[in-house]
Image (tube, rainbow, N blue to C red):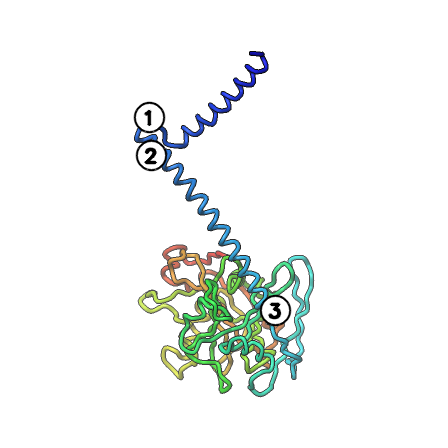
Amino acid sequence: MSMANEINTTHVKEKENFFVRAAKYFIPWKGDGVSEIFRKLMFIASIAIFVVSLDSLADYLRADEQELSYFEEVRSLEPDFGEPSSKGNGDTIDVTDKKGKITKIENPVITVEPRELQEWAMPLLERNDDVVGWLKIPGIKDSSGNAIINYPVLQHESSNDYYLHHNIDNAQTESGSIFADCVVPITLEGQADNITLYGHNMMNGTQFANLQKFKKGADFIKKNPLIEFNTIYEKNQKYVVLATFIGIDGEDQDGEGAFDYWNYRNFTADGHYSFETWKTNVLKYSWIKNNIDFNEGDDFLTLSTCTYELGSYRTVRWVVVAKKLTVKDSLDEIVESYKDKKDKDIYFFRAWRDTYGNKKVIVGT
């Protein structure tokens, strides 16, 4: 045999030995002890789980991409509300972003038109007759400059659970829709004194996830004070942020129930659900203060979503309360008045204090 053939044969044997050794290391083999067989089976099981996990992750990413695409399509349904018919007091403020760009915000236009079903709402109602309005927070934008919270608002006739997991096309989905509390229907004849809108805090940034940005406090709110919300019977209505706070559902707090802000719909003359009780609690819980003048005759909007400072198992909510602007309001004076409250001046519920003490802790911004 030649030297070349000897070298080639040796190489083949070494290669075969490598694969045999590898197989014997990972696969149960004749002569293995119980512990060695167990180790190898666990390894094989781990590889199988890893492969299945990769497949599940790929499915999740594909589904998430599809959902993001769907939300882009839904946002594209944003109506044209037309030109407002009358103006407020004409104030203008300059808002400077982190890059130094100055944007002028004019005092919002206040319409005085009669309440009637709006033409802008017709295409949305054709898609789903549970649509009752459109919500937009113009100051919270993506990298392309588009408003992120910019959605139709739905209201089920009898359930606050349905649109937790159904979209505008009535398809079941984890992210659901932005929806209005169903207890007081939004109709041509009227609406609640305080409308509460709910939305999920989604990891992909959709729905009310970016509502968490208001946790940044007064400086952020000065740059983003406005919320646009029109029921299908209105147009060009704007609200200004009044308060932000952490709430909790159903736990006893210092000998009394938690502030059940979601139950304040039409204010009662007195008692638990009176305007004064609501106002006292909103100011007591709020992380910010300002000089906004508000009373029982005003209209209010409450935005509510989950937050996870106490873990996903606790029913903790992040809440933004806003007041509908009227001709008497001066936006520049309101914006100038925003200030962060000191921790000692904020009421934190017992479960929060047990975890963090009496101080603000910010997650999710």
Circle 3 Cα neighbour tier, 10 Å, few/some/many (<14 / 14–19 / ≥20): few
Numbered marks: total: 3
Residue placed most toward the observer, 159 or 16: 16
**Tag of residue 38:** 2
Q: Earlier in the sequence, mark 2 or mark 3?
A: 2
Q: Nearer the viewer, mark 1 or mark 3?
A: 1
Secondary-structure class at tag 3: loop
Give the CA distance from mark 2 to mark 3. Answer: 57 Å
Res 276 visible: no
Q: What is the x, y in percent for residue 137?
A: 57, 68
Name the residue: 66% across, 62% down.
Answer: 96
Question: Between residues 90 and 168, which one lies in front from this camera angle?
Answer: 168
Near mark 2 (Cα within 10 A), the count class, few <14, some 14-19 or many ≥20, is few
Closer to viewer: mark 1 or mark 2:
1
Amino acid on which the number 1 mark rests in the picture: Gly
Find out whether the residues at labels 1 and 3 contact each other: C-beta distance under 8 Å: no
Q: Amino acid at mark 2?
A: Phe
Q: Vertical placement of 140 versus 115: above or below?
A: above
> Is residue 128 depicted above or below 59 in this figure?
below
In this view, the residue in front, 226 or 61, is 61
Quarter of image, res 237: bottom right
Mark sitting earlier along the chain (1/2)? 1
- Give the quadrant of residue 74: bottom right
> Considering the image in quadrants, where does the N terminus appear?
top right
User: In this rendering, does residue 159 appear at all?
Assistant: yes
Q: Which mark is residue 31?
A: 1
Mark 3 sits on what residue? 76
* Residue 282 position within the rendered picture, expressed as x and y whole percent measured from the top left: 45, 71
Q: Position of residue 267 (x, y in %)?
A: 42, 81
